[in-house]
Image (spheres, grey):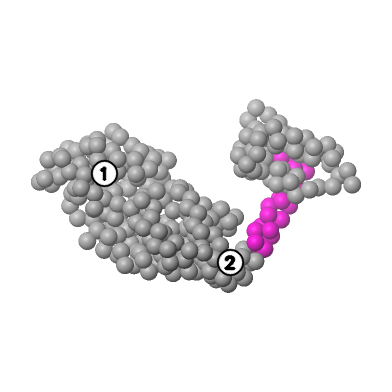
Amino acid sequence: MHNKILWDDLKTVMAIAEAGSLSGAARWLGVSHATVFRRLGDTESRLGAKLFERSRTGYAPTPAGEDIAASARRIEAEVLGVERRVAGRDLRPSGSVRITTTDTLLAGLLSPIFTAFRRSHPEIFLEIAVSNQLFNLTKREADVAIRPSLAPPEMLVGRRIGTIAQAIYACSNTQIAHDGTAEFSDLDWVGPDERLAYRPLDVWMAGHGVDERCHYRVDTLMGMLAAVRDDIGVAVLPCYLCDGDERLARVGEPIAELATDLWLLTHPDLRRVARIRAFMDFVAQAVKERREQLLGV
């Protein structure tokens, strides 16, 4: 009985193997560094085996540790699969739906839609996770993702619910806002920081020779928007976010090559859950009614 492996042991070993450190595993598990250290020590003591090699660069699993981590990954996949299948049998439109989306979509488009949904479905509670990174729907970090993407993950199901147009915007107090005649290469630009991972815009700016005029970079679109409002420079931003803002002025028409699809996604095991189906149908219809806002027309 002393060498019995518990589920907490498996999760701890898997977390350390994935993170390569005790601190990273602690963040992943939502516990303290000391707790992970203690759990690992207890597990190794009970099993009578060394599970990790310690070094200044981190924790590397031994063959025994890798064996346990691999088993934990398989068990976790089975547990998550059971959770999704059981959730899929829920036929009542009630309970909670966790949604992941971006800060710009929430502020510029989705917040009033979510408000209307809550009023029409008072038994369904919404949990919103705002992030520029796509949460792992397979691991139930979120139930539904609403994301701009040209190539959504193949393991998810859903629908394309619109096209997001983008254009150049300037502070409404500037000369270019009034006559729109300045050369792009003569303007100061605001651009995405590398952490925003906005490759299409990076390519466009480089192709138009304005990246060299970009001396202010931000890792969120909301930060770029604030910079344009304060006249730090001009920037390419989503039309749905900017067209109704009197502090901003659009310069020219939307940029065709930067148009992006908007996707509404979930895991295949959850698409028949009543509350999720109700939420996705409602959002899809509401966004469809705002098509002109998305397209900037």
Relative placement, left or right, of 295 versus 123 is left
Q: For numbered disc 2, what is the local secondary structure?
A: helix
Q: Residue at x 84, y 40 (%)?
A: 46
Left or right of residue 112: residue 43: right
- On the image, the x and y values in percent for residue 87 come to 61, 65
- Residue 278 in the image: x percent, y percent? 48, 69
Q: Residues within 10 Å of mark 1 (few under 14, many from 20)?
A: many
Residue under the point 24% across and 58% down:
296
**Magenta stretch: helix, strand or loop mostly:** helix
**Residue on which disc 1 sits:** 235
Between 7 and 52, the one lying in front of the other is: 7
The reply, left or right, for residue 242 in relation to residue 4 is: left
Please determine whether, in this image, residue 177 is positioned above or below residue 286.
above
Name the mark nearer the viewer: 1 or 2: 2
In what quadrant of the picture does the C terminus appear? bottom left
Q: Quick check: is 76 in the magenta stretch?
A: yes
Give the SS element for disc 1: strand
Q: Which residues are magenta?
A: 61-83
Q: Position of residue 269 (x, y in %)?
A: 58, 66
What residue is shown at x 71% (from left), y 40% (from top)? 61
Please name the residue that numbered disc 2 is placed on.
269
Q: Residues within 10 Å of mark 2 (few under 14, many from 20)?
A: some
Q: Nearer the viewer, residue 18 or 291?
A: 291
Residue at 65% across, 39% down? 31
Q: Amino acid at mark 1?
A: Ala
Q: Is residue 2 visible?
A: yes
The image shows residue 264 at horizontal and vertical percentages of 44, 62
Residue 151 in view here: no
Q: In the picture provided, is 175 more to the left or to the right than 193?
A: left
